[in-house]
Amino acid sequence: MTLLQIMADSDAAEVRVRTDNAEVIGTELARRGIAFDHWPAMPGLEATTPTADILAHYRGRVADLNADGRYKFIDVIRLQPDEGDPDWAAKAAEVRGKFLAEHRHAEDEVRFFVTGRGCFYLHLEPEVVAVVCEGGDLLSVPAGTRHWFDMGVRPDFVAIRFFEEQEGWIGDFTGDPIGQRFPSLDQLVAA
């Protein structure tokens, strides 16, 4: 379920908005300058669907989004459970930990969730806007926006990423531990 929860940045318990209504989510995000869209799911998608097939299926949508040619690097990222790897959980926890710290990017962070889910926490003073994205959701975090990302304790997602520069995904970490004071993806979804 796609979910929006807006909280005071000084107190996560002060929930100002909580909704899974797609229209309300779109309106609330647009008011804050955040682009959000929903694309139809890819039929027959499986964990093993080749990257080339995913990109081919969404070719028209990607072309429309990139009509001005600003995104020079478009790829697919996957983080899915690997039951055959006894170290998978530790590796996933390490990857997750890197993105839980507040950071910003010099360019927009644009993600389309093909499948699975993740939560972007946007620190838009005086609030934190948590957006749980699931398969079909597209979110664009504007350049310079302080944020963090939680993929949950058992990451499982496939996403298309859009970059202007090859190193566009590298974050500038703020050092603010704000993310530690807010509910995790798993807690948001369970509430």
Image (spheres, rainbow, N blue to C red):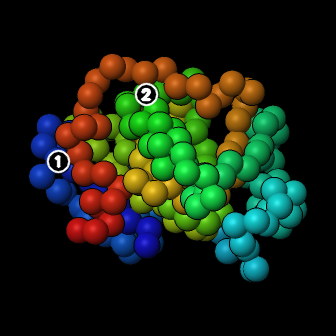
Q: Name above or below for residue 82 compared with residue 49.
A: above
Residue 2 versus residue 35: which sits nearer the camera?
2
Kind of residue indicated by mark 2 = His
Quadrant of the rendered image containing residue 57: bottom right
Please tell me which of labels 2 and 1 falls first in the chain: 1
Give the quadrant of the C terminus.
bottom left
Looking at the image, residue 65 sits to the left or right of residue 109; the answer is right
Residue 149 point in image, percent of width and height: 44, 43
Looking at the image, residue 164 sits to the left or right of residue 52; the answer is left
Q: Secondary structure at mark 1?
A: strand
Give the quadrant of the N terminus.
bottom left
Residue 55 versus residue 70: which sits nearer the camera?
55
Q: Which residue is mark 1?
A: 12
Residue 41 point in image, percent of width and height: 67, 74
Q: Secondary structure at mark 2?
A: strand
Q: Residue at x 30, y 51 (%)?
A: 184
Q: Which residue is mark 2?
A: 103
Q: Residue at x 53, y 41 (%)?
A: 91
Q: Residue at x 36, y 72 (%)?
A: 20
For label 1, the crowd category at 10 Å Cα-Cα, with few meaning under 14, some 14 to 19 and many 20 or more, is some
- Distance, label 2 to label 1, CA atoms, is 19 Å
For the residues bearing labels 2 and 1, Cβ distance under 8 angstroms: no
Looking at the image, residue 167 sits to the left or right of residue 36; the answer is right
